[in-house]
Image (cartoon, rainbow, N blue to C red):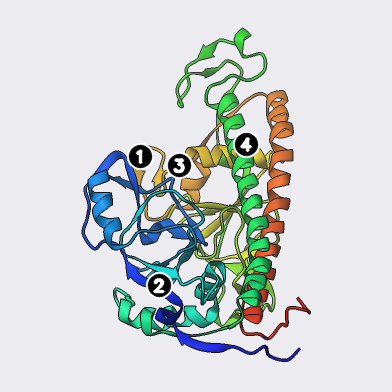
Amino acid sequence: MGMESLTEATLADVCNLVTDGTHDTPTRVKTGYPLIKAKEITGGRIDFANCDQISEKEHLQVIARSKPEFGDTLFAHIGASLGEAAFVNTNRAFSIKNVALFKPNPQAIDPRYLYYLVISPFFQSLAKGTKTGSAQPFLGLSQLRGHRIQYHRNLGTQRRIAGILSAYDELIENGQGRVRILDTMARSLYREWFVHFRFPGHKEIKQVPSVLGDIPEGWSVKKLGEVCVLTMGQSPKSEFYNGSGQGQPFHQGVTNFGERFPVDGLFCTVEGRVAEAGDILFSVRAPVGRMNIADKKIIMGRGLSAIRHKEGHQCVLWEQLRNRFTAEDLMGNGAIFASVTKSDMLGIELLCPPAGLMAGSTRQLKPIHDELFTLTKTIGNLQKTRNLLLPRLLSGQIRLEAA
């Protein structure tokens, strides 16, 4: 293997500019220029869909100081998001607030290579060290500019390393795009049948009153306890927990929830209350109503419950609960709950169509859910491989011939 020769410099040595965004609070407008803050930088992506907009005048004032351009790296250097980074992969005009901006000097460092350096454990250790014990963690520009980095001097080597890692990121990004499309399809299909009542043959069926408002004749409203098996979690003693993979995966609450499936972090060596693969994991403590799907057998702590449909209509149940609990901590009559009991859970009202229609909706939703499961697993494996490769390639531990 052997180590490849690395050189050392400060971040300022390899960048034309290390600066940050505005510290003011520009006025928000309905339509204008995106204002990207630290919370809009997650997992290497810039979230333009959920950010604030500011006027052209204010945007021009901000970009006079720091103008993000294609090839730059954004770095959250203040607050809870400290350490999050994103490669600017767009020519779109936008402003930044409480985010640092690194403009690479292309004669010294490849732009994508710089981004991978910033998200590597070597650079991130700076953020981790700052986060501990500080109420509002913060990395000043002088600290960032003076931060020493080790990197490959040869630009060709840098480009090849960035090429390998970005090939993984592209596959991950494509997979995530597909997940978003499938997820929207499942949600729309459910709403079409169960919210707008435009299911096959709906025109011949009149509406009748129910506790959930007008519903098609032949449909009923049942309590969750009538149609599902509910298991409430119970926490074993902490001496049985470990992070080294002994025993079964253990989930206490939503800490390790993913977009759809939980990510295992803790394990437990005694059998407790379990959720089986396919069960819906429902948070019963704040945030009440956040959900994931168990992708394997797990042991559940007090913060979770597991829900399984008695007739196997898990896909419909997932969409129904997800449609119902759009806002966290809201149960039933709009009252906010910090936690819910077993009887609260058993009393959740569910809309139940006739058996034939329920089976039909499961037939429509199950292939989408199955594909979402496969895609999510593939993305997870790609992320694992990339995260293993990244520090080894950057440290020269893996020679490029071997990679």
**Mark 4 highlights which residue?**
186
Q: Residues within 10 Å of mark 1 (few under 14, many from 20)?
A: few
As drawn, 14 above or below 71 = below
Pick whichever of labels 4 and 3 is earlier in the sequence.
4
Camera sees residue 186: yes
Q: Of circles 1 and 2, which is in front?
A: 2
Question: Looking at numbered disc 1 in the image, what kind of residue is underneath it?
Answer: Gly
Q: Could one spot residue 55 in this view of the protein?
A: no
- The quarter holding residue 313 reads top right
| Mark 4 vs mark 1: in front | 4
Foreground mark, 4 or 2, reads 2
Q: Badge 2 is on which residue?
A: 16
Residue that mark 1 sits on: 334
Q: Earlier in the sequence, mark 4 or mark 2?
A: 2
Earlier-in-chain disc, 3 versus 1:
3
Query: Between 71 and 139, which is closer to the camera in this rendering?
Result: 71
Q: Foreground mark, 3 or 1?
A: 3
Asked if the residue at tag 2 contacts the one at tag 1, i.e. Cβ–Cβ closer than 8 Å, the answer is: no
Report how far apart the C-alphas of labels 4 and 1 lie in the structure.
Answer: 26 Å
Instruction: Indicate which disc residue 346 carries.
Output: none
Q: Secondary structure at mark 4?
A: helix
The residue beneath circle 3 is 326
The image position of residue 266, as x and y in percent, is 59, 73
Residue 86, given in percent of the width and then of the height, sits at 48, 63
The residue lying furthest to the right in this view is: 402
Q: Earlier in the sequence, mark 1 or mark 2?
A: 2
Q: Earlier in the sequence, mark 4 or mark 1?
A: 4
